[in-house]
Amino acid sequence: MSTRSEELLLEAPLAITVISRAELASSPKRTIADVLRDVPGLTVETFSTPGMPRITIRGESANRVLILQDGQRLSEQKSMNGPPLLFSCAGVERIEVIRGPASVLYGSEAVGGVVNIITRRNVDAPLTGTVEFSADSVTRGWGTALTLDGFSEGWEYGLSGLRLEHDDRRTPKGTIKPTSYDMDDIAAYVGWRNETLSLRVRYERFTSVVASAPPPTLPIGVTSFYADIPD
């Protein structure tokens, strides 16, 4: 990844962390942001908006960290602070993280580093699947995730989804308002592959409704506002 060609991890010229499919499967964490909290040199920040986590690498802000999915750039045009990483881990094969400047290979957005999310592929069984459920006592929230993958006669196909619902966070000193959020992430793919060639079409839809504290520019008297992120 650090040279845009296949290489051994120990021979890579940059600091790289790879989170494997086995690690993702054994983790109770359901979103990309939650998984990345354990990566050295990487910080997940919410900026008082728990439903919109973004990452910084070695002190570089989120708009200086490049987010890729299967090598394709993910952009966020609303705040220009980088895309929030509340995406589901369902259907993810592995996550590759470059810590440190990679602008020579990936452009000026990669001054802080690069996060590449590799989706699941090369399933050999006609149908495999998982269903998971999680709960959060702090937010009285819950989440459920589903994955289905298969391969038959050269055709590969899959479906994954995640639903999260979280109320305002509760603390020993009271409830923090507004910090609630709801999120839906659904993805599907179909493709064809043989020993020398593969072709895949993938569709993903991410929607989120986030409660947030009002910015200083809003009129006096406004206590909260809701931002419905468009597709």
Image (tube, rainbow, N blue to C red):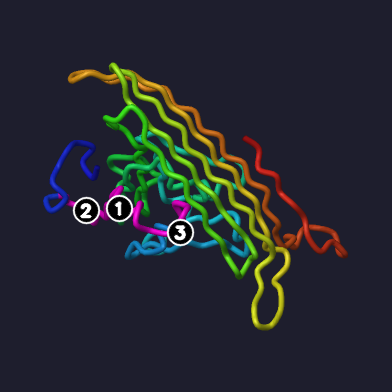
Q: Amino acid at mark 2?
A: Leu
Magenta-tinted stretch = 12-34
Residue located 32% across and 65% down the image? 40
Residue closest to the eye, 221 or 132: 132
The label on residue 34 is: 3
**Label 2 belongs to which residue?**
14
Cβ atoms under marks 2 and 1 closer than 8 Å: no
SS category of the residue bearing label 1: strand
Relative vertical location of residue 135 with respect to residue 95 in this rendering, above or below: below
Three-letter code, disc 3: Asp
Q: CA distance from mark 2 to mark 1?
A: 16 Å
Residue identified by numbered label 1: 19
Q: Are marks 1 and 3 in contact (CB under 8 Å)?
A: no
Residue 189: percent from the left, percent from the top?
43, 27
Mark 2 Cα shell of 10 Å, populated few (<14), some (14-19), many (≥20): some
Amino acid residing under circle 1: Ile
Relative depth, front residue between 14 and 155: 155
Q: Residue at x 72, y 60 (%)?
A: 215
Mark yes or no: residue 82 visible: no
Q: Residue most toward the right?
A: 221
Q: Which residue is the extreme one toward the bottom?
A: 173
- Closer to us: mark 2 or mark 3? 3
Of the numbered discs 2 and 3, the one sitting upstream in the chain is 2
Q: Residue at x 37, y 64 (%)?
A: 38
